[in-house]
Amino acid sequence: MQTKVTAQQSAFTSAEDRTLASVFCAYTVTATFWLLFATAVGVLMAYKFGAPDFWSGEWLTFGRLRPIHTNDTFYGWASPALVALAYYVAARSSRTPLYSVKLAWIGLVLFNLAAVAGTIALDLGFNDGNLEYREWPWPIRLIFLAALLVTAWNLIGTVARRRTEEIYLSNWYTIGGVLWTCIIAVVAILPWYQYGLGQVAVSGFYMHNAVGMWFTPLALGVFYYALPKVLSRPIYSYSLGVFAFWTNLVFYPIIGAHHFLFSPLPWFLQTTAIVFSVAMLVPVWGGTANFLLTMRGRMHGMARSVPLMFIFVGVIGYLVGSTQGTFEAFRSLQEVWHFTNFTVGHSHLTMYGFVTFAIWGGVYALLPLATGKQPQLLGLTLHFWMALVGSFIYVISLSVGGTIQGLNWIHGAPFIQSVMDMQSYWVWRGVGGSLMFLSHVVFAWNVWCMTYGVGAKASLDASSSTEGASA
Amino acid sequence: MNKLILIAGGSTLVYLTLAVLMGVLPGIMLSATPPGPGVNPLTALQARGRAVYVASGCSYCHTQQVRPLDQDKAFGRPSAPGDFAYQTPELLGSERTGPDLTNVGQRQSSVVWQYIHLYNPRAVVPQSIMPSFAWMFQVVNSAPSGVEPVALPKAYAPTHGVVVPRPDAQALVAYLLALKQPSLPGYTDASTESTRGAGPQGAPTSAVPPGAPGYDPAKGKALFTATCAACHQATGEGLPGAFPALKGNAAVNDADPTMHIHVVLHGLQGVNVGGVVYPSPMPPFGTTLSDADVANIINYERSSWGNHGGAVTDERVAAQRAKGN
C-alpha cells in the first residue's frame, strides 16, 4: 500500500513521506492518550453523581475534575488530533511536503506541555475564575497560543508552497480556524476590559467561539478531504463549500450571548444572538447537504467502509447538534433547558457526535494511507458501535432528564426534587459514558496498529482508492 | 499566493472585526457598569472565600444569576446589571445541578447549617449529591477558644474529638453569608401578593380540611420542603444539638399559634427548646414569604408528624404581621 501511495505522489520523496507520517502518528498518539485520560475522568465524575462520597478528597472533587475533563478533551485530545489531520491534508492536497517538520514537533511539544501544566494547575485549584474553557492560568494559555501560532505558520507555509493551482477547500477551513482561534485566545487572555458584567459578555463570546471557530472549521476541513478520498469522487459542490465557509465566518461570532439569555446582559445583545443562531442554519444545512449529496447513491458502501461510517455519523452529528443549538437559543425553549443537564447532552452531541466522530473518520481514512498499516476490522467495528450506542444512551438520557429538571423548576417543585428525579438518568448517563470510554480503549489499540504496532496487511475498505481524488 | 492572502488574511480581518464588535467592545462598555445601590465590595475574608469558591469549582454546579422568570423567584429578585460591579471573575455559571446562590446568605443565614453542610451535605440534606468538603475541616481533641465545633449529627461525627473549620472553610462560609441581594428601588416581588409554589391557585374549597380555610396540604409540604426542611428535616425531627425538632414541639402544638407565627415571620435565636439551648439563629421569613405561604407552612407543621396544633388562617398571619416584631 505504501508503495502504491508514493507511486501516485511522485512529487514526494519517500523520506518526506515518512516524515509526514511520523508527524501524523505522534500527534495522533499523544491526542489519544489525552482522550483516554479525559474520558476516564469523565466516567469518574459520572460515578460521583450516584456516589458523591466516592473518592471525595480535595484533588478528586467534582469541581476540580470538571474543568480537567473539558479542557483536556478540548485542548489535549481534539486540538492536536485535528492539527495532525490538518497537516496531512495540507501537505497532500497541496502536493508538497510540510513547510517545516521542526515547527510541527515544536507545536506538538507545546500542545502537550500546555495540557500537562493545565491539568496539574487545575487539580491544585489554580483555576482562572471558573470561566468555561479558559480555566487554565493565563501563562499556560500563552503556551497553547504559541502552539496555535506555530501551527498557523506551518500550515500557511505548506499551502504557500503548493504545487496545485487551487487552494483546496479543506485548507480554507483549517488555516482560517487556526488564525481565528489565535484571535479568540488573545481576546480571552487580555484582562484590562473584563470586569463584572463586561466579563460576562466576553465569556459568552469566548465560550462559543472557542468551540465553533476552532473545532467546527477543522472538523469540516476533515470532511471536505476525507469524504471525497474515501468515496473516490469529488465533493458535490465546491461553491457550496465556499459559501458555507463565509456564512459560518460571519454568523458564528455573533451568537455567543445566547449562553446568557435572561441574564443582565443588554437585551439587544441577547436578541441579536438569537437571530444569528437561526442564521447558522444556513451554513449548517448547506454544509450537511454538500456532504450528504457527495455520498448520494453510495450509502451501501458504508457496510464495507468503517471510516465512511464514522464520517457519516459525524455529518449527522453536525446537522443534529447544530440545529439543536439553534432551537436551544429560542427564549421559549431556553426557559426550560437553560442550566439543566440538557445542555450537557447538547455539548456531548456536538463535541462527540460531530467533532470526535469526524476526527475518527479522518484518522481511519487517512492514517493508514500515511503509514501503510491497517487496524483490525474487529477493532474498528467494536470502536464504532460502542461509541455510537454509548453516545446515544448518553445524549438521550440527559436530554430527557434535563427536560424533566427544567419542568420541575417551572412547576415550582422544591429544588431537591430536580436532583432526585435525575438519579436514574444519571445512572444511564454513566452506562453510556462507560461504553464510550471502552470504545476509546479500542480506538487506542487501533491507533497503535496503524502507527507503531504491526497493522493488518489486508486493505479493508475503499480507502485504498486513488490518492488525490479530492485535490 | 495572492489567493492565500485573500482567504487567510481576508477571513482573519473579517473575524477580527467581529471579535472586536461582539467580544471586546461589549466587554469594554459593560465593564463600566456602575454598582447598584447597596452593592459593596467584599471584605478581605469574604474575598478569600470567593477565591476558595473558584478553586473548588463551585460554579460548575451553582449559578449566581437570577432570571426574570417565575421559576427563579425562589432564588431572589432578578439580577440587575449593577449587582456584578465587584464580581471579577464573574461567577454566573451555566449549570444548576445545585441551587442558585445569588441570595444564599439571605435564604440560609445559619453559620451552623453552612458548616455542617460543607462538611457533609448529606448530614442535613439526605438526597444531596454535593461533594463533601471535609478537607477544609480538621478533627481536634477540643475546639480552641473562640471557635465553635461543627454541630455534626452523630452518624457523621468522628468517633472522638470534635470537627472545627480550617481558615478556608471560615472564609468560604463568610463569602456565602455575604451573598445577599440588596433590595432594588422600584422592584416589587409579585410573589408576595400571589403565592408561589405547587398547585393551582384558588383550589376548590371541598379539598380544604375543616377548620383550615385556604390550606392546601400539597402546597404546604412543597413550601416546607423548599424553605424549612434543610434545618428541621423532612421528618420534622431537626438535628439534635443544631436545629430543634418540630415534631412534638411545644410552640407548634400550642393551641395559641402566636409564638409559632412570630418565629416564622421574625426568626429566633438562643431559645431553650425541650431542655436544649440552640445558639444557631433561625432567619426571619416574613420578608420573603407571603401570608398565605406562611399559613400553609404553619398548617403543614401543625398537622404533620403527629402534631395537633390548631389551624391558622392567612388573615391571622396578616394580623400578626401588621403588629410588627
Image (cartoon, coloured by chain):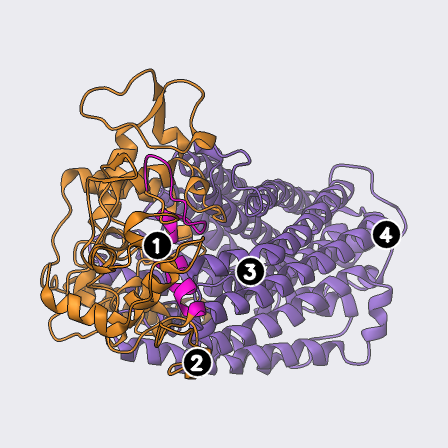
Using the rendered view, name the quadrant where residue B243 is placed. Answer: top left
Q: Which residue is mark 3?
A: A421
Residue A406 rendering spot, x and y as whole percentages: 48, 68
* Residue type beneath disc 1: Cys
- Residue at 30%, 34% (x, y): give it: B169
Q: Are marks 1 and 2 on the same chain?
A: no
Q: Position of residue B25 (x, y in %)?
A: 23, 68
Q: Nearer the viewer, residue A91 or A335?
A: A335
Residue at which label 2 appears: A332
Q: CA distance from mark 4 to mark 3?
A: 41 Å
Q: Amino acid at mark 4?
A: Leu
Categorize mark 4 by other alpha carbons within 10 Å: few (<14), some (14-19), many (20+).
Answer: some
Single out the mark in the foreground, 4 or 2: 2
Residue at the image point whose x is 44% and y is 53% from the top: B306
In the rendered structure, the answer to whether residue A467 lies left or right of residue A43 reads right
- The letter of the orange chain is B
Q: Dividing the picture into quarters, in which one does residue A220 lie? A: bottom right
Q: Is residue B175 left or right of residue A395?
A: left
Vertical placement of A244 versus A55: above or below? below
Q: CA distance from mark 1 to mark 4?
A: 60 Å
For the point 45% across and 49% down, the residue is: B235
